[in-house]
Amino acid sequence: AQSVTQPDIHITVSEGASLELRCNYSYGATPYLFWYVQSPGQGLQLLLKYFSGDTLVQGIKGFEAEFKRSQSSFNLRKPSVHWSDAAEYFCAVGSNDYKLSFGAGTTVTVRA
Amino acid sequence: NAGVTQTPKFQVLKTGQSMTLQCAQDMNHEYMSWYRQDPGMGLRLIHYSVGAGITDQGEVPNGYNVSRSTTEDFPLRLLSAAPSQTSVYFCASSNSGTEQFFGPGTRLTVL
């Protein structure tokens, strides 16, 4: 069975500081991996995805993630956060695009 | 393109009532899915469909029915609502190799 763990429930970061969100997954084969962002009261927006190939993936809004098979991880990073990055972030894993398992989410607060 | 649309946005039901959450997409996507989102639990897959006439159960299917008579529509039916079904429901669609596009959600409260 596939599963995702996001160890950090809540992270607070200063505006302009770097951000790293952790994601560990359990999956038997090569997974499809995703990071989504959800602003309050909104739906989910895809930040980036990994299917195969280069293990460093670039996404929208200046985010990137690195797939590390040996550590079963897919951590999300941003070098310098903006106040608009305050949101909830979800990591997801699946064997395809339509049957995903999501982590519990990490809420990011950005302080001025 | 409207993308993925969901109706209603909000709904309050009494225990035992039935209702249908509507989901439609205009992107000609093959795959459609229903998730529920609960605090601290992320999104959990309820049912999914890989094409018209084909549906299957996800992680938490009990208490919900789906059908897919057209490519565009994928309604979710609650047969007899229970307080445990209070949640935010998201519909999503995709094609193979693409991202899942999520609708804006339906916030359901069961009293």
Image: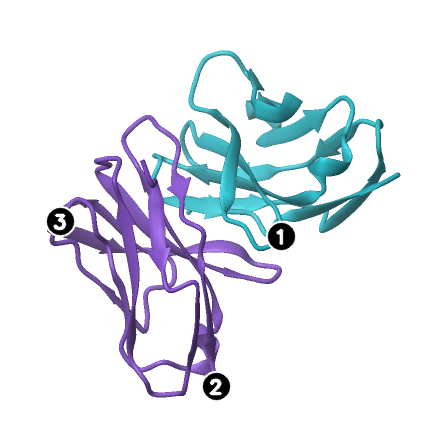
Chain colours: A cyan, B purple
Q: Earlier in the sequence, mark 2 or mark 3?
A: 3
> Does any portion of residue A63 appear in the rendered image?
no
- The image's mark for residue B111 is 2
- The image's mark for residue A40 is 1
Task: Find residue B23 and report its image quarter.
Answer: bottom left
Q: Give how far across and how far down residue A28 sits, in percent.
A: 42, 35
Location of residue A42 with respect to B62 vertically, above or below: above
Respond whether the residues carrying marks 2 and 3 are from the same subunit: yes
- The image's mark for residue B70 is 3
Q: Which residue is outermost to the top? A: A54
Gap in angstroms between the C-alphas marked 2 and 3? 32 Å
Q: Counting other residues with Cα less than 10 Å from the Cα at mark 3, is it few (<14), some (14-19), or many (20 or more)?
A: few
Q: Which residue is outermost to the front? A: B1
Task: Choose between A26 and A32: the one closer to the eye.
Answer: A32
Q: Are marks 1 and 3 in contact (CB under 8 Å)?
A: no
Location of residue A101 with respect to B57 vertically, above or below: above
Q: Which three-letter amino acid code belongs to the residue tagged 2? A: Leu
Chain at tag 3: B
- The image's mark for residue A6 is none
Q: Is B45 on the left or on the right of A64, as rendered? A: left
Q: Which three-letter amino acid code belongs to the residue tagged 3? A: Thr
Q: Is mark 2 on a helix, strand or loop?
A: loop
